[in-house]
Amino acid sequence: MNRPAIDLEAISLEILFATGQFVRRLRLESATDELSWTQLAIMARLASQGPATIADLARAEMLRPQTMGSVVSCLEELGMVGRQAHPTDGRQYLFGLTQVGVEIFAAAASLKLAWLTDAVTTLSPTEQETLAKTAALISHLADA
């Protein structure tokens, strides 16, 4: 029995469209219009992993160091992150969330999580299981 070929390009386009809509909805729910998705991603990384250098953040977020420097500089100007001397390399700084940054990030994350949890409860148990598997697959694709 021959199985029909899967249209990988069509699946890829559908994923791109759906993730774009999903990101826009999360941004809407978080009420952080003044912060970009990249800025929020950096804040999330600093919240979960602690202070980091520009180079470390750039590698982790797959951005050029120059781009990361601009984004972190903007966050620093907004008072969301602060810098401290690197303990072993006097040429670098470690950047971490300030108290204001922690509070703003926590509030945004809480709003997004509340919306998403409510949305997931509208799915059937089977759909919830499928979503859990899909989340793992998307995470795997992001690391590919």
Image (cartoon, rainbow, N blue to C red):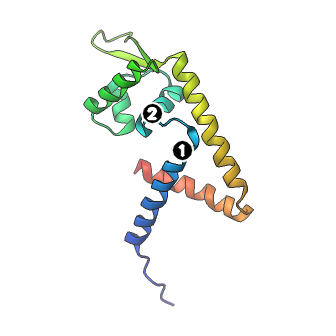
Q: Residue 130 lies in what quarter of the image?
A: bottom right
Q: Is residue 23 above or below residue 65?
A: below
- Circle 2 SS class: loop
Q: Residue 79 lies in what quarter of the image?
A: top left
- Amino acid carrying label 2: it is Leu
Determine the residue positioned at 55% across, 37% down: 31
Give the percent coordinates (x, y) of residue 23: 49, 49
First reached walking from the N terminus: tag 1 or tag 2: 1
Determine the residue positioned at 48% across, 52% down: 140
- Residue occupied by mark 1: 28
Asked whether the residues under the numbered discs 1 and 2 touch, taking CB atoms below 8 Å apart as contact, a structural biologist would say no
- Amino acid carrying label 1: it is Leu
Determine the residue positioned at 50% across, 22% down: 50
Front residue (pair 140, 27):
27
Q: Is residue 67 left or right of residue 105?
A: left
How many numbered marks are there? 2
- Residue occupied by mark 2: 35
